[in-house]
Image: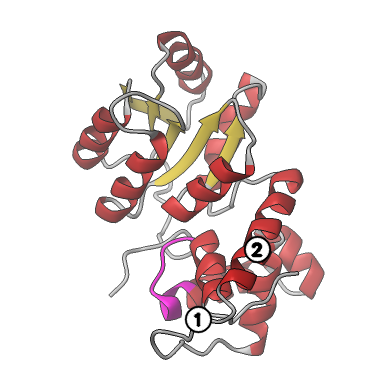
Amino acid sequence: MTEPDEATRPARRGDPIRVLIVDDHALIRRSLEMALSAETDIEVVGEASDGQEAIELADRLTPDVMLMDVRMPRRSGIEATREIKASVPSTRIIMLTVSDEEEDLFDAIKAGATGYLLKNVQLDEVPEAVRGVHEGQSLINPAMAAKLITEFANMSRKEAERPPQLPVPRLTDREMEVLRLVAKGMNNREIAKQLFISENTVKNHVRNILDKLQLHSRMEAVVYAVRERMLEIT
């Protein structure tokens, strides 16, 4: 049985979004804390200064959303994300970094990150980013989505000669349409508009995809589908 995922976990109406901030620079942690604490629907429940501390705090606090620096001492943000998604899969993680390098982006998504923000983002945009991933959106801007698609295409070519390891769960034609649009970086609203269906219907399709593939996030599903040659991206 899979853990509640970004499409199925019910929102706790009235409860603030519980956020854990992870960065090795105290000034950045303070800036993020000030920006988020000003919001009535967001609560900063803790701070960590490295990846190892982030893992320990995530296990204890089970935050809804984490803002995670990529490069930190002891354990990197990507290493920490991988462990946290294994132990606390309901937590959604936004990677925060100065770099938009393709390798960082792809590694973050493979590790289980739901979003990716550059540190030069305006602080007043951070609360909306937190709300977006908490509501089930993948926080990846169009430029980054294009880079992801390039990486997916490269991975697809490298995997072309590898036979599937296990029988691949069958998705419906509509589910495959939704998955292709997720791979392009579209959010639920954009997918609904593209397919002329409601956002709730999109959410149901995403939930079914994740249930069938036994995965926890939209981008994990895309990576899996490319690897198993269910989805070809060129």
Classify mark 2: residues with Cα within 10 Å, few (<14), some (14-19) or many (20+): some
Name the residue that disc number 2 marks: 154
Q: As displayed, is residue 146 above or below residue 213?
A: above
**Horizontally, is 233 left or right of 96 in the view?**
right
Q: Residue at coordinates 47% horizontally, 60% vertically from top-left?
A: 217
Q: CA distance from mark 2 to mark 1?
A: 14 Å
Q: Whole-percent x and y of residue 191? A: 72, 66
**Horizontally, is 183 left or right of 210 in the view?**
right
Residue type at tag 1: Arg
Q: Residue at coordinates 53% horizontally, 54% vertically from top-left?
A: 136
Q: Which residues are magenta?
A: 210-217
Q: Quadrant of the N terminus?
A: bottom left
Residue type at tag 2: Asn
Disc nearer the start of the sequence (2/1): 2
**Horizontally, is 220 left or right of 123 in the view?**
left
Q: Residue at coordinates 59% horizontally, 25% vertically from top-left?
A: 98
Q: Residue at coordinates 44% horizontally, 43% vertically from top-left?
A: 93
Name the residue that disc number 1 marks: 162
Residue 16 seen from this side: no
